[in-house]
Amino acid sequence: IISVMVNLTSYNTLRVAAYAREFREIREIGEIREIETNEPYMFLGEGANVLFKNDFPGTVIKINLLGKKVISQDDDEVIIEVAAGENWHNLVMWTVENNWSGLENMALIPGTVGAAVVGNIACYGQNQEDVFLNAQVTNLKSQKGEQYNISDCQFKYRESIFKTKPELLVTSVQYKLSKKPLANTTYHSRFESLNITNPTPLNIANAVIELRQKKLPSIDKVGTAGSFFKNPIVSREKYSEISAQVKELQWYPTDKLQYPKDAPLPDLVKIPAARLLDELGWKSKVIGRVSTYERQALAIINLGGATGQEIFDYAEKMREDIKKNFEIELEYEVRII
């Protein structure tokens, strides 16, 4: 399906009005051969991690490849294959309803399976890359299908090779999940209200859903892209300095931050950007038609009719405030177009 001058408002969760010169939907692998690579193009899943600051002067390609199946299984493990256009949360719920463990902490993350690989998502101590087996990838330049194993993907914190090589299109992914509970509730213990007494994959997923619904805005109700910034990585010395200013500032270990994984890590910790923004009064702060969520300063909200430029300007003010007060450069998690 090919259309011209398409309004992308309904194709991005920030609900920003922007136009693509051409819009194409891919529902079959064979349609990938028709993509013109000599002009600007970009892939789009559910638009849950993108800000259109401007119109797009080329082709926006929406990936609607669907399907999921069991490849193999034994008493301990199951290998599944999932098409890139499948909804991520629906995938998680399918796995936990089958009592398979490995994805349950990543319930309710918006977006598609392909986008989850590209952005190497993680939540509450679980990482997409921990259960990743391989991906089927089409190279648009060579028009060849290739299998990318975990080392090929160069996963690191919210990054992968697919972000740096836009000609690589993930078409399907294989995950290896456990039939035995691998409950990781280290993060959940901080939230007494969850009270997970029987940590089955389904119970953990439901607890995560409850927690995310309390903390984050619903993309069905407001224009948002979830967490707008990555959590900053700082030295332990810098953390000590900031924690003297910001009470109850938590820190997290810095695994999964770089590629190759065997490279030595300096003495670094990850700290929550949301807590720093809270300290500076950004929660619920309104500037024009843009705000942050009342319960989470990391989630920028389109109050209605805001342009991509307005949202970008708002985000830049947040970055400037963090830089001024803590000498930290916040990095965008959302892709700016």
Image (cartoon, rainbow, N blue to C red):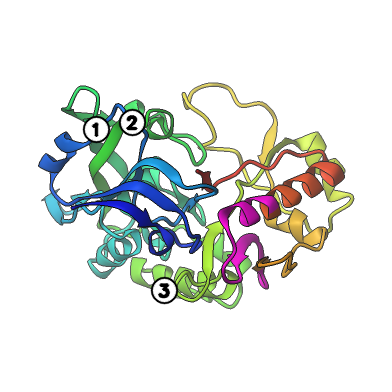
SS for callout 3: helix
Q: Name the spot of residue 127 as percent of width and height, x first.
A: 43, 47
Secondary structure category for the residue under label 2: loop
Tell me which residue sits at (75%, 67%) in the image. Answer: 285
Q: Which residues are magenta?
A: 293-313
Of labels 3 and 2, the one closer to you: 2
CB under 8 Å between discs 1 and 2? yes
Residue 126 seen by the camera: no
> Could you tell me residue 275's position as x and y percent?
73, 57
Q: Earlier in the sequence, mark 3 or mark 2?
A: 2
- Residue on which disc 1 sits: 36
- Residue 64 in the image: above or below residue 145: below
Local packing at callout 2 (Cα closer than 10 Å; few below 14, some 14-19, many 20+) is few
Q: Position of residue 35 (x, y in %)?
A: 22, 36
Q: Residue furthest right?
A: 244
Q: Please, what is the three-letter code of the amino acid marked with disc 1?
A: Glu
Q: Quadrant of residue 134 in the image?
A: top left
> Which quarter of the picture shows residue 239?
top right
Specify the amino acid type for callout 3. Answer: Asn
- The location of residue 8, given as percent across then percent down, is 40, 57
The residue positioned 60% from the left and 66% from the top of the image is 301
